[in-house]
Amino acid sequence: MSFLKATTLAVVLVSGMVGINTAQAAGDLTTKPERLANLVMGSEQSDYSFSEKKYELETGRSYRLKIIAGGQKECAFQAPAFMQSIYLRKVEAGGIEIKSVMLTELEFEDAGQAEMFFVPVRPGNYPYYCKGLESKGMQGEFVVK
């Protein structure tokens, strides 16, 4: 290979690598997780309600979300597409710390709470809901940028 071709190839490769770090997430995983507003299921006005209808998140930032069931209605909390687009660090419930790669649902049969610690890794809009109760108002959305 001639010197000119070798030099041109090296310049092209290096210039292509320069832009690699420009598409980084905005988050800093060395800081404490950002505490999101609690998601409370049920209220004095309606058994079929969520206190929050929308959470705005960023990829690469660490979050903690407490989900609280008032016990008025049984709820199988689900967010399948969201759960596939996060790094789940752990779930704390009933004095137990659960470390798992994937979470399918959190089922609340009575009053109780669970806290999720996670990092979003894929942007998008992801619905969350209580299975079978979406039409009654028990639904919301995670918006990840």
Image (cartoon, grey):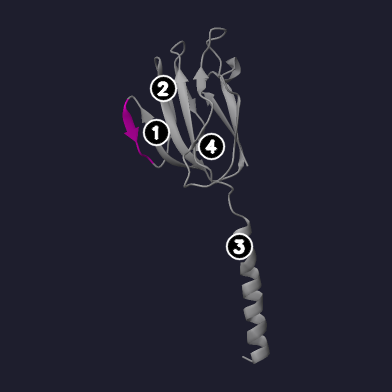
Which quadrant: the C terminus?
top right
Provide the residue designation for mark 2. 113
- Disc 3 residue type (three-letter): Ile
Per the image, is 1 magenta? no
Dot 1, how many residues are within 10 Å of its Cα: few (below 14), some (14-19), or many (20+)? Answer: many
Which of the two labelled residues, at mark 3 and mark 4, occupies the earlier sequence position? 3
Residue lying at 60% horizontally and 24% vertically, measured from the top left = 53
* Distance in Å between CA atoms under marks 2 and 1: 10 Å
Residue under label 1: 91
Q: First in sequence: mark 2 or mark 3?
A: 3
Spatial separation of the CA atoms under disc 2 and disc 3: 41 Å
Q: Which residues are magenta?
A: 95-100
Disc number placed over residue 46 in the picture, else none: none
Disc 4 residue type (three-letter): Phe
Sequence-wise first label, 2 or 1: 1
| Image quadrant occupied by the N terminus | bottom right
User: Disc 2 or 4, which lies upstream in sequence?
Assistant: 4
Q: Earlier in the sequence, mark 4 or mark 1?
A: 4
**Amino acid type at mark 2:** Gln
In the rendered image, which residue does mark 3 sit on?
20
Label 4, on which residue? 82
Could you classify mark 2 by the number of other residues whose Cα lies within 10 Å: few (under 14), some (14-19), or many (20 or more)? some
